[in-house]
Amino acid sequence: HTLLIRLLCLDFVQGRIVGGYTPSPNSIKYIVSLQSSKGQHFCGGSLVHKYWVLTAAHCNIGPWVSRTPELSAYEGTEQYSKPLSLVPHPQYNSSTTNADIMLIKLSAPIELNRYVSLAPLPKQNAGLLAGRMCRVSGWGSTSHSGGLTPLTLRTVRLPIVSTSKCNSSNSFSGNITTNMICAGSSTGGKDACKGDSGGPLVCDGRVYGLVSWGNGCGDPRFPGVYTAVSRFRRWIDQTIYSPFSRCLKSAGLFSRED
């Protein structure tokens, strides 16, 4: 089967969304839906270059495609592309979910326009303070049990939870690595959920996290766990630009944030 990348014209990146709301149409211009050849959504992602999508390494479950606007209907602003190659991070560990990040090179470029733009990324190793409000979006499950998959994009605002609190004995007991970020409500009921994997956690307008894993959905003891994108900014840039970096540098045109 083939995978379709459905680029959705909206403005935040995703999560498994419980307790959220529907954002205004075309407000998240870089969110991507990874779909099977039958059009079934299974992961989210972010467009970071006209040829590249950023998602979670655990979304590497077969061939697929990407598209942009509403999942429930064709609106004329969607774009589709098939993957040319998948580049999971070399240190990705499926047992610990560490380094859960992957780049997908598209077979054809996405046209950037009023509906589709690139996701801004943080600088290398940029941090987030506990309590900072962020936003996660996706087409994942809207119920705590993991059922009910919506046909429209949903989003929810969540505060960052400190790694020390997330690693405590009554939470994830030391399983949160330096390559992970936790975010969730202290009262529960708001979270990313099944089907939101790979989508972005957006803070200050930048994709700081990718929906990675958790323990249930919306449990106050167990915040959602996200891949810390800032830990991998150099890897992202090197993967996308390394074939061209030498000639760009020699031409005096090579500059980037890291």
Image: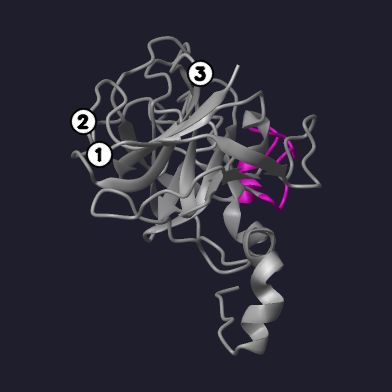
Q: Which residue in the protein does label 2 denote? A: 75
Q: How many marks?
A: 3
Label of residue 77 in the image: 1
Q: Looking at the image, do the residues carrying marks 3 and 2 touch, with CB atoms under 8 Å apart?
A: no
Residue 185 visible in the current orientation: no
Q: Secondary structure at mark 3?
A: loop
Image point (50%, 45%), residue name: 108
Q: Secondary structure at mark 1?
A: loop
- C-alpha span from label 3 to label 2: 19 Å
Q: Please name whichever residue, 174 or 143, is drawn nearer the observer in this view of the structure.
A: 143
Q: Residues within 10 Å of mark 1 (few under 14, many from 20)?
A: some
- Magenta segment range? 163-179
The answer to whether residue 186 is left or right of residue 215 is left
Image point (54%, 31%), residue name: 197
Q: Would you place residue 214 above or below residue 205 in this image?
A: above
Q: Which residue in the protein does label 3 denote? A: 37
Q: Would you place residue 252 above or below residue 237 in this image?
A: below
The answer to whether residue 115 is left or right of residue 145 is left
Q: Would you place residue 58 above or below residue 166 in this image?
A: above
Q: Secondary structure at mark 2?
A: loop
Q: Residues within 10 Å of mark 3 (few under 14, many from 20)?
A: some
Q: The residue under label 2 is which amino acid type? A: Glu
The quarter of the picture where residue 107 lies is top right
Q: Furthest-front residue in view?
A: 108
